[in-house]
């Protein structure tokens, strides 16, 4: 099978029109109303720099700017949203928590259950939003007791990893999920509804793993979005991290026998391989994703492709990872958004430069010290040499040219 990056499939005009059709789908209109959040021109795609300057950074000590922003009259809408677009388990929690902690400004989320129990639910005010007050169909402020940023509000979204087209991916990015989390308490544990990070001591609480109940979904108009942070993590590490979370979920929900819990929840290469081959392999998602991937292949390529995917552990998650980042890049470029590509590993490689560039992009000031970054969460030892190369081949075969430029560092 000839291996080469596939050609980019996005068509900018079609995608931009899709955004506006999505707004019509939401029954929203800007006719005759001011567009406070819309700019007359767009900026360079996938920028890694900005005009704003922050203080000197360190995980243990920094020079900070302590002066608060002057009081301003309340605007009709809050600061512009900047989507933090991330495939799950890519470092979203750390990025959100550290940005909020170091800036001492709140961040936002499309997922309402992430507001800690001790805080009221406060929705972001958007132009021409649907609903108001507790019924607003907009993202929520995760820590509403903190001041809003002056210009840009970092907002968490996972978009839609199984989307077969960019329009469906975009809908997922603008989806509000209203849920109530019910955790099955462990023995001697009273449980908690808190799924986001803790504030106060500047640490991140472990994500609560629970049952989602009473889920409602809404969509908001994505046209005011002009900047995004595209968070990327190595597929080798991302897939293992997703296995860790899935195994914890199954354990807390009582889906494992005592013997399975011992075998599957350990953070070892053997547990990963056994989980992928015995539990994940029966997922119906696998077949659907494989069918989509095979559409562009001829008969001989399909045979080789299937042999390749059968050798890859948790291949469904690998396919989702590829599909998600393909759609993210297509959306960013097709909609002519200004973006910051944030590689999770750069926190470890060059922490100060990475956070400085992120804060410049968000036009935030550093006022407090960073949350220590926990390095060492790498899992290439969980794969055989053959599996590592098979994943490289699969990614290069299915990634768009633009996506491959962003992720090839993981395979060099």
Image: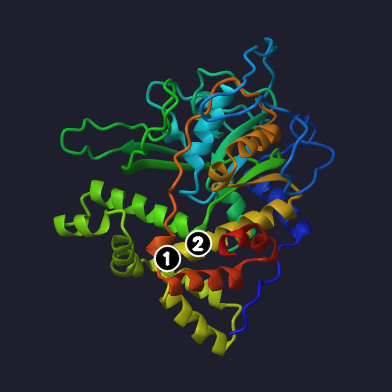
Q: How is the image coloured?
A: rainbow
Image quarter hosting the N terminus: bottom right
Question: In front here: 154 or 287?
Answer: 154
In the rendered image, residue 250, in percent from the top left (x then y), is placed at: 27, 52
Image quarter hosting the C terminus: bottom right
Residue in the picture at 55% in, 73% down: 393
Q: Which residue is mark 2?
A: 320
Which image quadrant for residue 125? top right
Q: Mark 2 or mark 1, which has the lower sequence index? A: 1
Which image quadrant for residue 383? bottom left
Residue in the picture at 47% in, 49% down: 88
Q: Are marks 2 and 1 in contact (CB under 8 Å)?
A: yes
Q: Residue furthest right?
A: 40
Q: Residue furthest top?
A: 71
- On residue 285, the disc is 1
- The image shows residue 199, relative to residue 94, as above or below, that is above
- The image shows residue 119, relative to residue 286, as above or below, that is above
Report crowding for label 1: few under 14, some 14 to 19, many 20 or more residues within 10 A (C-alpha): some
Secondary structure category for the residue under label 1 = helix
In the rendered image, residue 314, in percent from the top left (x then y), is placed at: 40, 65
- On residue 329, the disc is none
Find the distance from the CA under tag 2 to the CA under tag 1: 9 Å
């Amino acid at each position: 099978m000839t291996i080469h990056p596939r050609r980019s499939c996005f068509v900018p005009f079609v995608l931009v029109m899709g955004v506006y059709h999505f707004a019509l789908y939401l029954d929203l209109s800007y006719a005759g109303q001011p567009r406070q959040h819309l700019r007359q021109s767009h900026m360079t795609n996938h920028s890694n720099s900005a005009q704003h300057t922050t203080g000197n950074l360190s995980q243990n000590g920094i020079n900070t700017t302590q002066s608060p922003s002057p009081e301003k009259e309340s605007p009709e809408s809050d600061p512009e949203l900047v989507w933090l677009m991330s495939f799950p388990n890519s470092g979203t929690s750390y990025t959100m928590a550290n940005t909020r902690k170091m800036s001492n400004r709140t961040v936002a989320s499309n997922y309402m259950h992430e507001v800690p129990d001790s805080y009221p639910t406060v929705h972001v005010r958007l132009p021409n939003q649907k609903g108001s007050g507790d019924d607003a169909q907009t993202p929520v402020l995760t820590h509403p007791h903190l001041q809003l940023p002056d210009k840009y509000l970092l907002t968490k979204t996972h978009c839609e990893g199984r989307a077969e087209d960019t329009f469906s991916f975009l809908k997922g990015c603008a989806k509000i999920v209203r849920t109530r989390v019910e955790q099955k308490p462990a023995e001697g544990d009273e449980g908690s509804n808190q799924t986001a990070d803790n504030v106060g001591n500047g640490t991140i609480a472990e994500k609560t793993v629970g049952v989602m109940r009473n889920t409602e979904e809404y969509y908001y108009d994505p046209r005011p979005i002009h900047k995004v942070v595209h968070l990327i993590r190595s597929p080798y590490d991302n897939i293992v991290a997703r296995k860790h979370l899935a195994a914890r979920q199954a354990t807390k929900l009582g889906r494992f026998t005592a013997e399975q819990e011992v075998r599957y929840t350990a953070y070892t290469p053997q547990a990963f391989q056994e989980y992928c081959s015995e539990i994940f392999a029966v997922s119906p998602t696998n077949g659907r994703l494989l069918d989509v991937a095979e559409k562009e292949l001829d008969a001989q390529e399909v045979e080789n492709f299937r042999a390749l995917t059968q050798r890859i552990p948790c291949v469904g998650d690998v396919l989702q990872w590829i599909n998600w980042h393909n759609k993210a890049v297509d959306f960013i470029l097709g909609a002519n958004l200004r973006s910051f590509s944030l590689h999770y590993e750069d926190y470890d490689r060059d922490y100060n430069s990475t956070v400085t560039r992120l804060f410049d992009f968000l036009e935030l000031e550093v006022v407090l010290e960073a949350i220590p970054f926990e390095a060492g969460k790498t899992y290439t030892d969980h794969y055989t040499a053959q599996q590592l190369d098979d994943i490289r081949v699969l990614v290069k075969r299915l990634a768009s040219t633009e996506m491959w430029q962003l992720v090839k560092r993981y395979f060099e």
